[in-house]
Image (cartoon, rainbow, N blue to C red):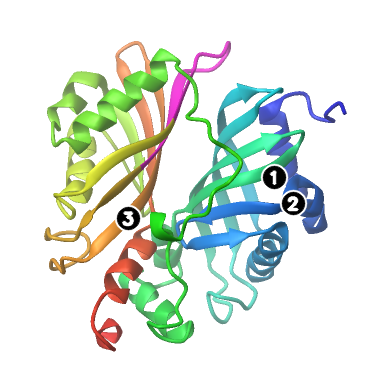
Amino acid sequence: MASRFANLPDYIQGVTWEIWEGRQIASLHQAYGRDMIARSTLGVMTGNVDVINDTLASLAAFPDRQIYGDDVIWSGDEASGYLSSHRSMIIGTHTGHGVFGPPTGRVVAARCIADCYVQDDVITDEWLCYDMGSMVRQLGHSPEAWARASITREGGPEKARRPFTPGIDLPGPYQGRGNDHPLGQKLADILTAIMAKDVAVIGRSYDRAVHISHAGGVTGWGIPFAEAQWMQLRTCFPDARFTIHHQIGRADAGQPDRAAIRWSLDGHHTGFGLFGAPTGTPVHIMGFTHTEFGPWGLRREFSLWDEVSIWKQILLALPDHSYQG
């Protein structure tokens, strides 16, 4: 059956608009597979009914929510299906009740990256990260305080929803690893060096005017800023093992050379820094990086992970009720 969309980016942007701005939430019955696996940093959902209910709850809390598509970096083909890595900005006013509590009237803007496997216009596998750290800060909370409150709200450490880790993952239909484009490999080599603590690779590979956007709504310019941001994450989990799960490179007419990588860090919270004093807790970080390359090196970098889910893993591992602070 022929698609009603011109191409994969058109499909991703079109379906996103229909669901959120068009309020066609029920269209998820067609756009998402009945037995789909949706992995977000917050946990794992199975089946499109859970996704539909979660979407409804999000719109109820932010009724004017809009999703501005920034880029779709993709791989695959019609026969085997496509993998879309979709970067967007989500903007909405907190005027409804929901998981974020009573309405505050605050406007919240946060980045999101979603990797979706699409075949025959149906999404059956998904990996998703919202910039929860940025969202909760804009609503007046710290990521640590929000993680603590979430554990309490969900019934305490025994009942609280578990953030995503490989231990709770479920197998899905997508088994691909992306494509073999050299731009994807270029980004893979850069990230691998950074995670191996070769921070000097940033000076060798980045444009001196690089623009950086990281988790927590952090944004800035220049090589020293990029170095500082990556070191602050890495020093919290110095023994963490870095793994690349998916990589895409693309050189499309009329667009910058670009790449997308989904990666993870698995290690222990043994370093001082963004996540407080070391606890020794094992932590899994689901991460996403999108980049654009220019004539003088890597010129734009968007990297995203979920600070709230990291805090939640740390707090859930503490004994008894010490998560309450």
The residue that mark 2 highlights is 19
Q: Which mark is residue 16?
A: 1
Q: Secondary structure at mark 2?
A: helix
Give the Cα separation between the discs numbered 2 and 1.
5 Å
Give the Cα separation between the discs numbered 2 and 3.
30 Å
Give the Cα separation between the discs numbered 3 and 1.
28 Å
Spot occupied by residue 171 in the image (x, y as percentages of width and height) = 54, 49
The three-letter code of the residue at mark 3 reads: His
Which residue is more in the foreground, 318 or 259?
318
The three-letter code of the residue at mark 2 reads: Ile
**Figure check: 129 above or below 162:** above
Furthest residue in direction right, as rendered: 1
The residue that mark 3 highlights is 284
Spot occupied by residue 316 in the image (x, y as percentages of width and height) = 32, 75
Earlier-in-chain disc, 3 versus 1: 1
Can see residue 71?
yes
Spot occupied by residue 9 in the image (x, y as percentages of width and height) = 66, 29
Q: Who's the residue at 27% across and 51% down the image?
A: 266
Question: Is residue 107 found inside the magenta-colored segment of the image?
Answer: no
Looking at the rendering, the stretch of residues picked out in magenta corresponds to 247-263
Magenta stretch, main secondary structure class: strand
Earlier-in-chain disc, 2 versus 3: 2
Tell me the crowding category of disc 3: few under 14, some 14 to 19, or many 20 or more residues within 10 angstroms, Cα based: many
Q: Secondary structure at mark 3?
A: strand
